[in-house]
Amino acid sequence: MFPILWRVGLQSAAYLLLAILPLGIAYFGTTDEGRGFWIEFGVGLGMVAFALLAMQFITTARFRWVVPYVGSDAVIYFHRQAGILVLLIFLAHPLILFAADPAYLAYLDPRVNFLRAVFLIAATIAMLLVVLLPLGGLRFGLSYEWWRLTHGLLAAAVLVVGLAHSLMVGHYVSGLAVQVAWVVATLIAIGLLIHARVVKPLRMRRKPYRVARVIPERGDVSVLVLEPDGHDGMTFAAGQYAWLTLSETPFSLQQHPFSMFSSSKVRERIEFAIKEAGDFTSTIKDVRPGTRAFLEGPYGAFRIDPRAEAAVLVVGGIGATPALSMLRTARDLGDRRPFVLIYGNVRREDIAFRDELETLTNELDLKVVHVLSEPEPEWTGESGSITKEILDRHLAPLADRDVQYFVCGPPPMMDLVEHALLARGVPHWRLLSERFDFI
Ligand SMILES: Cc1cc2nc3c(=O)[nH]c(=O)nc-3n(C[C@H](O)[C@H](O)[C@H](O)COP(=O)(O)OP(=O)(O)OC[C@H]3O[C@@H](n4cnc5c(N)ncnc54)[C@H](O)[C@@H]3O)c2cc1C
């Protein structure tokens, strides 16, 4: 546990340091001109907003060295919260300057400098759009993919305007070394965007996959079986996910995240269990064998700790996918540890992978508890929501063990189960959640 905390602590400290680095450079680089506290404060906020905005590109660059410790959902959550902070600081920067000295209003006056005013006003509108639209879930008719691309490009445009503004204002950014540092920071941020959008697809192009077959499952689920085309396939840990592109080219904007469904011990094929949820997922059942596919990954911290003495998987609906991968892998490894799968579904006929789970109970030390929210009258198993009482009933035999808990399913179920597990005394660091709706 502690190495992970150390790494998260170090990454957080590095983040904070980079955020205030421009202030340090300014402090040591320039002499005080007696402009007064509020002006210096307002100017300082502008520099911090610039640094924080540049760092937003790190959290969306899908670096595996960030995600393994905290999970992709936590990284995206952080990106959103940091985005709000950047916007607040970004807006506070001019407002404080205008309040401290109204002469600064000239920056927005097109009669004084037309281009400067237009760019600053446009950057402010772009910044508001970049942060507020995702929070409000507004896409103005753009598909998710086009919206994501626009979000990145607008943020990059704001950064470039911010750079030009800092260089033109001068003062703290008048020395050559500081100017070079500012330009390099901007180039790194934009480089990260190019890395995600150009370099990664180029790498993926060297490792294509082919759809081998599509197998229908219960509950509007299709199992997509891919085979590596001319390479050894992907190494992943059971529970992780990858971004899937079904297209002749990895540069396609269509890229969706799916948890691996197959055993991580099988390299010659990789499977995804995909439930119909919208435009893309509804097409999976009709995908033809031979279709070209690309995978970016693996990602995610939802994986079994080899030191844990047992694993409890509490899942709902299609959230069972990573759990199935873990159980299939445990079978292939001959893992003798106890597993408990608590699996929520609406009705019995919706339970995907029911037959395979029955087989797995004979191959592993596995107990499967089905919980149905709308059971048929003849159902004698657990029913309703997955509550603390249900968990208490089935998890008591594991009381003295070092158990790792995994939660994946619809958001209301996950909230309920996470609270119930914590109320049972499960330590935070032994509870892992995978949210399919984090984006
Ligand atoms: C880590 C992770 C693992 C997942 N694993 C599985 C799995 O194993 N099986 C499964 O069936 N589903 C899984 N999902 C959910 C799956 O990614 C979405 O259901 C799918 O992307 C929806 O696309 P759509 O166009 O069919 O639906 P839409 O109706 O267009 O979208 C429904 C919602 O899905 C999200 N979404 C849409 N497009 C994208 C995209 N390109 N990238 C990310 N999110 C998008 C948006 O929040 C959107 O509001 C997983 C999601 C995540 C984040």
Image (tube, grey):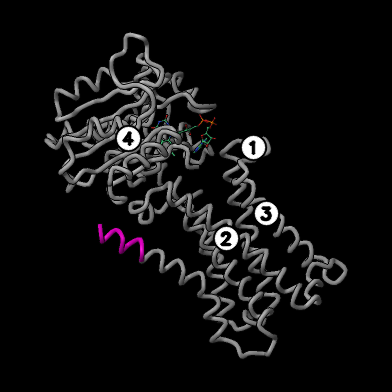
Q: Is residue 95 left or right of residue 207?
A: right
Q: As shown in the figure, which amino acid type bears the numbered disc 4?
A: Lys
Q: Is residue 3 magenta?
A: yes
Q: Is mark 4 within 8 Å of ligand 1?
A: no
- Given this view, does label 3 or label 4 mark the residue nearer the observer? 4
Identify the residue position indicated by label 3 in the image.
Answer: 128
Label 3 element class: helix
x then y, percent, for residue 415:
42, 39
Whether residue 228 is visible: no
Residue 176 in sight in this render = yes
Disc nearer the start of the sequence (3/1): 3
2 vs 3, front mark: 2
- Answer whether labels 2 and 3 touch (C-beta < 8 Å): no
Outermost right residue = 111
Residue placed under numbered mark 4 in the picture: 388
Provide the secondary structure element on which disc 1 rests.
loop
Q: Amino acid at mark 2?
A: Leu
Return the residue nearer the eye: 335 or 180.
Answer: 335
Marking on residue 85: 2
Q: Which residues are magenta?
A: 1-9
Which marked residue is nearer to the observer: mark 3 or mark 1?
3
The secondary structure that most of the magenta stretch takes on is helix
Does residue 378 lie above or below 396 as drawn? above
Q: Residue drawn at (71%, 69%), measured in percent from left and top?
A: 94
Residue position marked by numbered label 1 in the rendering = 142
